[in-house]
Image (tube, grey):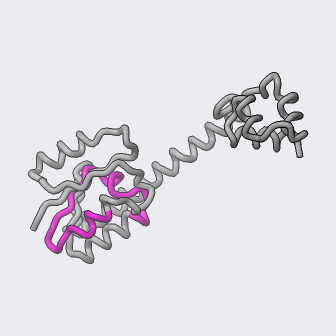
Amino acid sequence: MSKIGYVRVSTLDQNTDRQEIALSELGIKTLFIEKVSGKNTDRPQFKKMIEYIRAGDILYIESISRLARSTRDLLSIVQQLHDKKVDLVSLKENIDTATPQGRFVLTIFGALSELERESTLQRQREGISAAHLKGKKFGRPRVKNPKDWDKVIKFWKDGEISAVEAMSRLNMNRGTFYRRVKETGIE
């Protein structure tokens, strides 16, 4: 029987120290650590961990949200672990799937975690929509065409200069140049 730890944060700039410390205090030496979204199970260290664990092992996580973000994924992972005869312990929620009560509570916490995530996304969409209604603009501000746009475009259309030369004179990259040409209806 081995104690295995799984640590995950969503982005590269987030820190895993808190989770690593919590697991190391339990004497867990084998940790699978990654900095990637938990939106699905297509995660390199997660896959390695699933391949690594064996019957009788116990998988420790700091919280359910570190393992899965959707109830469906969580239940699927718990089933994979169960099929391998591996128990799961979540420290934050104090859940141990070695017991029927632990498996039941895990399902409820998983559903609550998914509800929280969906509510956050809904509030975010509503906030963006409200901002749009108030005239808020998102993204980079639109830059006007350079002052010599018309002159350079005429040279280009007349075949006097190449598109590359036109881009250079206008100090535009290829994508911006052709997008502006399309937007202005130049054929």
| Residue 12 percent location from the top left of the image | 37, 42
Task: Specify whether 166 is left or right of 49.
Answer: right
Q: Residue at x 42, y 59 (%)?
A: 111
**Magenta part of the chain:** 47-73
Along the line of sight, which residue is nearer the eye, 50 or 55? 50
- The part of the image, by quadrant, that contains residue 168 is top right
Total labels: the figure holds 0
Q: Is residue 25 above or below residue 69?
A: above
| Residue 97 percent location from the top left of the image | 23, 65
Q: What residue occupies the far top of the structure in this picture?
A: 147
Along the line of sight, which residue is nearer the eye, 40 or 167? 167
Whether residue 11 is in magenta: the answer is no
Residue 112 visible, this orientation: no
Q: Is residue 55 above or below residue 74?
A: below
Task: Specify whether 68 is left or right of 116.
Answer: left
Along the line of sight, which residue is nearer the eye, 3 or 143? 143
| Residue 64 percent location from the top left of the image | 32, 54
Q: Is residue 75 above or below residue 92?
A: below
| Residue 32 percent location from the top left of the image | 24, 55
Q: Residue at x 37, y 67 (%)?
A: 75
Task: Specify whether 93 is left or right of 150.
Answer: left
Q: Residue at x 13, y 60 (%)?
A: 3
Q: Residue at x 64, y 34 (%)?
A: 139
Quadrant in which the N terminus appears: bottom left
Residue 106 visible, this orientation: yes
Whether residue 67 is in magenta: the answer is yes
Q: What residue occupies the far bottom of the structure in this picture?
A: 83
Task: Specify whether 136 is left or right of 86.
Answer: right
